[in-house]
Amino acid sequence: MKDKILILEENSIGFGFISQDYLPKGKDEYYLRNKQHIHEQDHWRPLRAVEVEALVKNGNTADDWDLIYVRDMFEPSLVRNCSFFGMVRLGDIKHATLRHHDLEVPVGLTNSQIISCDIGDMSAIHNVHYLSHYIIGDRCILVNIDEMNMTDHAKFGNGVLKEGEDESVLMWMDIMNETGSRKILPFNGMIPADAYIWARYRNDKNLMDRLKEITLQHIDKARGYYGEVGEQTVIKNTRIVKNVKIGSMCYIKGANKLKNITINSSFDASTQIGEGVEAVNGIVGYGCRIFYGCKAVRFIMGNNSNLKYGGRLINSFLGSNSTISCCEVLNNLIFPSHEQHHNNSFLVAALVKGQSNVAAGATLGSNHNSRANDNEIKAGRGFWPGLCTSIKHPSTFASFTLMAKGSYPSELNIHLPFSLVNNNSSKDQLEIMPAFWWLYNMYAMARNEWKYLNRDKRVHKFQNIEYASLAPDSVEEIIESLDLLENELKLDPKDRENLIFGKDKTQKKYPDILSVDSTSFERSKRAVVLLKPFSGYQAYLQMLFYYSMKQIAEYLLNSPKESIFDMSKKQKARESDWVNLGGQLMPLKDMNRLLKNIKSRSLNTWGDIHERYDMLFKNYPKQKLLHAIGVLGDVFHIKILNDEKLKEQLERYGLIHDLITERVYSSRAKDYNNPFKQLNFESPEEMEAVLGKLDDNEFIVSTKKENQKIHKMIAAQLKDL
């Protein structure tokens, strides 16, 4: 039987961190440590005899005092009851107190075992029972830690190989489904766009091979890197920290286990990890919060994201500006701005394209409907499954789909954006109300972009994100929906312009409930009906017109109107194929060129790829403008070629803005006028004291001001025509 506990030579602790097999010729085991440390090597000096004598009197021990180095400002009385092994280098230590919140500790080292570490200036290390192979920054506080250890092959959460390792030890993340068929190799700095192109285009073997090759080259393969704790970081009352790289100003308190992770943190985007947390094999972004018994395994958290109150994040990528608490999230790729707050919600095997909100009791993927692992859910931006929603795999949802409470019995393909979907179990039918957001929930729709921009607290914005609910991706979904509704309602596409605000010239009465082909929406034989289809159709037209004129109006603020005439005149076929690449939108042709350049080795690092993302984003405003002009031409046959045509469309745009402002107010007013909402209040005054005055609502006020601003802009433009 092979021994599990070996007996080594005496005085071996702190030496041999890097095996001789992996040491470069002419290098010692400290060469990477010296490379990592920011201070010049000659800043340390050996101990003086009087200092060694003082250290021994204070109950300290060392295998070899000649391997203990200090700086000139060294007060040996502040080092007590410590054991030193290997080469240890100590920064400035003098009489002073470090304070962090209500915690005050003296500078110095007490009751700790230090093995081959560098300790920064004016740091406090107290009751750290095992601290091995770490570089600790200046003014750090480490208090009451059971074990803080390193191995020579640490990867800090990156899916890479160290020298001499077999591919069998690679750490993959199984995102989007449970089978591993879309697995990716995580790395520090990865954003959802990277994960998407890797997980999505599995049929392109050359691309898969290149992405793997680029990632394996992303991190140095050399063995022997030390763990790092950035300056002014606090770690207290924590059990195990192993193979962890920690940035500056990080605050870790009461964690159970942190292993093989990178914790990004900085002075302007501090990350915090709290009580009972266990995080293994992952990357934590800047400005994140992980608190209260959370479990994270094989994960990436984007910047400014939160994991709280016992939430479980496993084999999943959580985009920036997101919050998950009290729930279970497995095998997902989630784009930025996702909210999931409740203990009994469950999300598995999904691609969720951001700006999403999962309500309590939602079980998305927990109901197996095959003999294999769960398949996949694909949800566009703004996905919102309501209370106690149960959805089967595989299902797809257009942008801003709102799911009413219910257990949906079959796979779904909801391709009408901004819809309300309801499982009417009493009638055994699926009900879809197109353009529900525009018709009945304008407050939420209009507030969408404003809300997410305000919540984007990222200091390090490594990814460009489109927050507007009406953008090329959702607009193209609307355009595709027009054909279906026109076919079902027997409408003439030539009347689209007249129907933006007007009525159907035929004066035809359209049904409030319209049966449609069920097979295109649901894998079942039961009825599928559209609710208020004509109202939804007209709303879609208004949304398309508003989107187009919004881009044109914003362009006119700083550009001559003649350029709009010129672009309209030269407008060719609009770009109709768009990709949501981790929250950033781009034409499909740009995406295809990007992938081609990766395979042809024009782009050789993830840094190169990220630079391409940024370059493409610089083109996006103009692409969006041209798309808007194309929508006007292709959908409404409107070309803005002269002053008269521009005047007409600007006046219509003003009417649209009035409509939005009115509906923002009226949709919010429902919460005040609802008699059942008033039951909990003894008087209108109490209601206002609790809820605030409707007219003082911050977003309503800003919407009215924006409407006034738009009308002033329109008036100024009209004056010049």
Image (spheres, grey):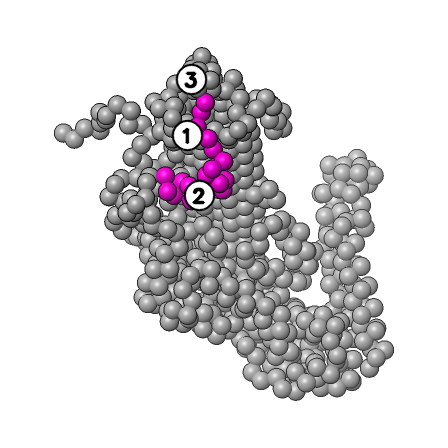
Circles 2 and 1 in contact, beta carbons < 8 Å: no
Nearer to the camera, 287 or 246: 246
| Residue at the image point whose x is 24% and y is 43% from the top | 21
Q: Tell me the residue that label 2 is attached to.
A: 36
Q: Can I make out residue 478 in this image?
A: no
Q: Tell me the residue that label 1 is attached to.
A: 88
Q: Residues within 10 Å of mark 2 (few under 14, many from 20)?
A: some
Q: Position of residue 89 (x, y in %)?
A: 44, 31
**Label annotation for residue 356:** none
Q: Relative to residue 709, is residue 167 drawn left or right?
A: left
Q: Earlier in the sequence, mark 1 or mark 3?
A: 3
Q: Residues within 10 Å of mark 1 (few under 14, many from 20)?
A: many
Vertical order, 270 against 394 (above or below): above
User: Of helix, strand and loop, which one carries label 3?
Assistant: loop
Vertical order, 70 against 591 (above or below): above
Nearer to the camera, 616 or 436: 616
> As shown in the figure, which amino acid type bears the numbered disc 3?
Asn
Q: Please state the extent of the stretch shown in magenta in the rendering.
A: 30-48
